[in-house]
Amino acid sequence: RDPIILVRGLRVNFYTYAGVVKAIDGVSFCIERGETYCLVGETGCGKSVTSRALTRLIKPPGRIEGGEIIYYPEPGKPVNIMELGEEELQRIRGREIAYVFQDPGAALDPLYTVGYQVSETMLVHGIIRRIKDGFQRAVELLRKTLITDPEKRVRSYPHELSGGMKQRSVISISLSTKPKLLVADEPTTALDTTVQAEIMDLLRRLKKEEGLTLLLITHNMGLVAEMCDRVAVMYAGQIVEEAPVDEIFKNPLHPYTRALLRAIPDPSRSVEKLESIPGTVPNLVNPPPGCRFHPRCPEAMPVCTRRPPVLRMGDRHYVACWLYAGKGRSGGGGA
Ligand code: SF4
Ligand code: MG
């Protein structure tokens, strides 16, 4: 085992007028160096918040209230993210752990050329000393992300680029610092279908070429099947099941995972809104007691309304559900 990041018992709250939203409540997982790890679930389940918390990228009214986040830039060299000062954190965030978000338009500055923005990122992280030193590297990066005519495009402004080219530019910026972990949060959701497939192919290839570890956040089970090595299913701020990707599709254990998979006989369909599972995603100000899925679960038992199930482990397969109580060891989940 060679973890790149280890999360234990993560809790994130949002302090709103409506009350305290317990957005992430006891999430634990471990991403192995070199793998593609996937967080999947409906809107509002906490996938994005979890991925942002990895570098403490949570803005008020959100706050990380507990848990451990250990980053291993190299095997056996743990860095405790929770204890870092803002300056040390800045060095890791964007440089070693880079993000690609859903909307490339929002990630790019409309006032500067793509080449400038690649260079600026390298300048900020101390990779180059003057902006103009970055342009040659920017051309190479644009070529690597398959932007046609990179010598010309390096001087383009964001408004001159298509959605797909914008996202390729964002990926170029992310790669400019040679990150170890790339977090891609719904990177193709804002793009049309053909472009989506191209960007996913690109990410897969770059992951190999650049030796990246990839954390992919998605609501698309088709992408999970195509891209991922291991997958964690999130529900209402918790991980309810984690397994290698084949295992999740062949042998889903949690009733929510099963419902997810039944809901999408066509894997290209989105699970962003699952009308096919009766009931609604719970309110996280007052989450249901016991298992948070119990109001929607066809197999709920009396114990489910009283006590939260703990994540239980089989061999690399973890599930938080009372149906499996006593089968396998009880444990911290994923780690
Ligand atoms: Fe359903 Fe109970 Fe399992 Fe929750 S713990 S998923 S309510 S069977
Ligand atoms: Mg999201």
Image (cartoon, rainbow, N blue to C red):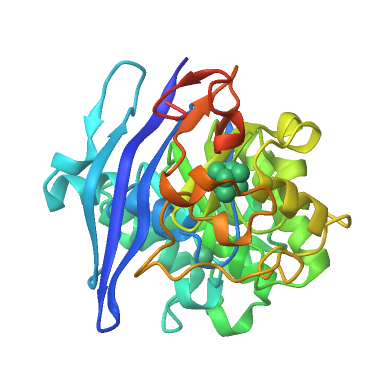
Residue 62: where, in percent of width, then height? 26, 67
**Residue 42 in view in this figure:** yes
The extreme front residue here reads: 302
Above or below: residue 313 compared with residue 263: above
Residue 46: where, in percent of width, then height? 46, 59
Task: Determine the residue positioned at 77% across, 67% down.
Answer: 276
Residue 297: where, in percent of width, then height? 64, 54
Task: Determine the residue positioned at 44% across, 36% down.
Answer: 180
Above or below: residue 216 compared with residue 332: below
Residue 313: where, in percent of width, then height? 53, 23
- Image check: 113 left or right of 243? left
Where the C terminus falls, by quadrant? top left
Above or below: residue 160 compared with residue 88: below
**Residue 94 in view in this figure:** no
Task: Determine the residue positioned at 47% across, 14% down.
Answer: 1
87 or 254, which is in the foreground? 254
Above or below: residue 188 compared with residue 137: below
Task: Determine the residue positioned at 42% across, 44% down.
Answer: 308
Image mark count: 0
